[in-house]
Each structure stands twice: as C-alpha cells, then as structure tokens.
Image (cartoon, rainbow, N blue to C red):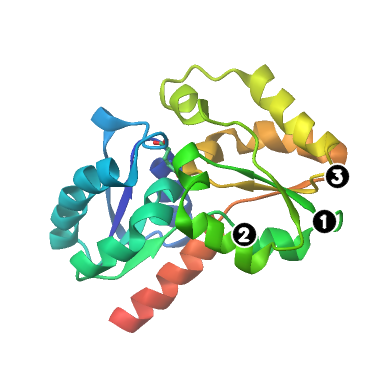
Amino acid sequence: MKIGVFDSGVGGRSVVNAIQKELSGTEIIYVEDHENVPYGTKSPDELLKLVLPILAELAIKSDLIVIACNTVSTTLTETLRENINIPLIAMEPMVKPAAEQTKSGTIAVCATPTTLSSNRYFWLKNNHAKNIKVIEPDCSDWAYMIESKAIDHTKIRRRISEVCERGADVIVLGCTHYHWIEDDIRVVADKFGAKVIQPEQAVIKQIKRVLLQLA
Ligand code: DGL
C-alpha cells in the first residue's frame, strides 16, 4: 500500500515522520508545493487551482492520500473528494476534542487565516463549541517563519502566554507547520497547566482503518 501525503511545505513532513513511526513498512510518497507556500493566506479559489492538479497526479501513484494541511482540508475537502477517486484523509483543527477537554470553558485555536475563515471551521465551532469561548490568536506569519527557518521563539511564546492568561486551558494546533514548534508551545502551556493537542494520532488511526478496508 502506498500513502500519498500532501502539504504546502514542511508541515506535512512532521506528519510523515509520525506515520513512519507507527507504520514503518508502508511506502509514503510525500509531495509539497514549495513554490507556493504559504497557503494560509490564499483564497479557496487560488488553492483549488494549485491543489487539484497536484492531488490528481498523486492519486495515480497512491492508494490513499492524507491532506496534511488544515488550510486545504477545511476549504477544499468536499470538492477534492468529488474529483479524486481514492480515499482522502483530511486534517482539521481539533475543535471537538478541545471543547470536550476544557475545564475552564475557553480554548485557543492556532491556525492560518484561511482556515479560520473557512465554512468548515465555522461549522466545527457551531456544532462542537457553541458554549465554549474560542480564542484565535494571530498566527498569520507562523507558517512562513517555520518554512523559512526564521522562527521568532519569543513572539510565539508570548502569543501562547497571552491565550493562557485569557483562560485557555486547551490549545489546538490547527496547522501542521506548528507541529514543529509544539515543544516551544508546550513549555509555555505547561506553566499554566494547559494542554496542547494536534491530530497526528487521530489521523494515523484513520489511516489504519482505511488500509484495512482497502486490503
Ligand atoms: N501546513 C498547512 C496547514 O496545516 C499550511 C500552512 C501554510 O502553507 O500557510 O494549514
């Protein structure tokens, strides 16, 4: 079985590492769109033009595809599923688990501007976090910082401190690029007793389910 993994850039590589740890024998074909990263400030139309041809080609070589990009997953999954004939596994902000786990009634979702303005994200909040306060800190330059290896650790830690001070006790990493700064974020979150969650393990479970169905 071959698993295609796609992201705009290095975010997807952290997902590839996690999949390889759990499913060591599986062949992974990783594709990124380095020329057009970051995706997180692009419109759904711009994204569709970029992503559809890439995934159509990746689908020829793969048995299933993981869209290791919250920005693409929250804006395009439905349209992509109509056009691509192999299973697509999407990654999106873990609003539901965060809402279930919060004790303070406040969560923070760190994600790109395009994810935060997507219909799917609104749906997630409306359906799972209606009575929860959701803080969306400005992370608009984080993916670019991480991609270009120019991470401003102080800025990131300050932003996380702010959301914790405002009462967030669960912090959702809603962009796969941020998995690379998870340790940084955890250092601050730990001081406030806040949890940090991201969807790699849930996605691996889903991959296993799909692989069983395909076998
Ligand atoms: N890693 C992607 C995500 O999960 C996209 C980041 C970007 O290219 O802006 O949203």
**For the residue marked with disc 2, what is the amino acid?**
Lys
Measured Cα–Cα span from mark 1 to mark 3 = 14 Å
**For the residue marked with disc 1, what is the amino acid?**
Gly
Q: Position of residue 86 (x, y in %)?
A: 23, 70
Left or right of 94: which side holds 30?
left
For the residue pair 38 and 68, the one nearer the viewer reads as: 38
Measured Cα–Cα span from mark 3 to mark 2 = 23 Å
The 10 Å Cα crowd at callout 3, few under 14, some 14 to 19, many 20 or more, is few
Q: Which residue is mark 3?
A: 193
Ligand 1 closer than 8 Å to label 3 CB: no
Residue at left offset 43%, top offset 72%: 208
Residue at left offset 49%, top offset 38%: 113
- Count of picture labels: 3
Helix, strand or loop under label 1: loop
Image quarter (top left, top right, bottom left or bottom right) of the C terminus:
bottom left
Q: Which residue is mark 2?
A: 125
Q: Quadrant of residue 81?
A: bottom left
